[in-house]
Amino acid sequence: MGKLDGTVALITGGAKGSGRSHAITLAREGADIALVDNCVADVPGQNYPGGSEEELQHTRKLVTDAGRRCITIVADVRSADEMVDAAQRSIDELGKIDHLVSSAGIILQFGKLADISPEQWRTVIDTNLTGVYNVCRAVLPHMVERRTGNIVITSSTAGRAAYPNISDYGASKWAVIGLMKTLAVEYGEYGIRANCVAPTNINSGDLPSMNNNPEAYKLFCPDIENPTREQMIERMKFMHTLDVPGVDWQDVSNAYLYLLSNDARMVTGEVLHVSAGLTANNIA
């Protein structure tokens, strides 16, 4: 028996990366999955490719290979209407929504606050913060009606401490924690829990990602001309008390699984750090 047998999870940002890992992990534990991604590979200012429709369908195959039902929905979290439609389609085709995994997120060009354009600011905040509001707003009436539901939102260690050159991203990740805590207070009486997972850098192997692209190498190694991935990894190791450059997608998915399962039935309004010790020196 799986920890999520008979349940349905809606996952945003499900085409690849962390979203794909979450989908496979929850499916293995018995959940049917609704995958949502905007499938826009090239966002202006993004240093790594976004998910594609082909990748979204591949994630769907991995879920169905695990023996679970899966639907795919191409929709943008920045659109309130599209999120309402995505939630309704999930209910119509899979019967209900027990879990919301709000995993969609983006990071664009690095720079100090005054160097970040208004257009970039809006894109990051609209995706990472307003997108979370949109999808939560879309699923909450259904969860309230059923008097049960779990919401887990991806924050970041950048939402727990100030990191230079990503003020837009950091602001969004701090803000979703406040949104989550308010959800937990407002909707606890309906049996709805809300929590955040705050990962540190995530290892993506050789795949281009938020932490694996030439601009990210420069961010971690500003004193090196044309730094390599290997040089960045060495710098990242010093950030973590466990002496690793980052955590794996599965490490983060395991945290999601815990918070969505009955193992965490009395956990709400909390932030679970998957930081390899990065946050150990934070003020309690």
Image (cartoon, rainbow, N blue to C red):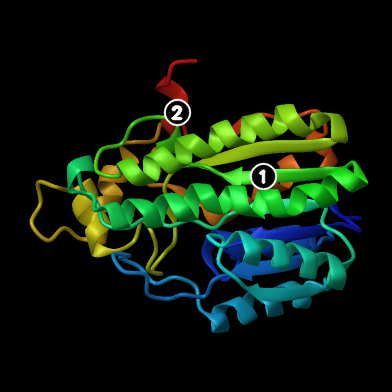
Q: Is residue 113 above or below residue 185?
A: below
Tell me which amino acid carries mark 1. Answer: Val
Q: How many marks?
A: 2
Residue at x 23% of width, y 56% of height = 217
Name the one closer to the observer, 197 or 240: 197
Q: Is residue 149 above or below residue 62?
A: above
Residue 41 sits in quarter: bottom left
Which of discs 1 and 2 lies nearer the camera? The answer is 1
Outermost residue on the bottom side: it is 54
Label whose residue precedes the other's in the sequence (1 or 2): 1
**How many angstroms separate mark 1 from mark 2 (CA)?**
20 Å
Residue 26 sits in quarter: bottom right
Outermost residue on the front side: it is 81
Name the one closer to the observer, 195 or 66: 195
Q: In this orientation, does residue 268 appear? A: no
* Residue 256 left/right relative to 284: right
Q: Which residue is mark 1?
A: 152
Q: Quadrant of the N terminus?
A: bottom right
Q: Which residue is mark 2?
A: 279
Q: Residues within 10 Å of mark 2 (few under 14, many from 20)?
A: some
Tell me which amino acid carries mark 2. Answer: Thr
Kind of element beneath mark 2: helix
Kind of element beneath mark 1: strand
Residue at x 68% of width, y 68% of height = 35
* Residue 92 left/right relative to 258: right
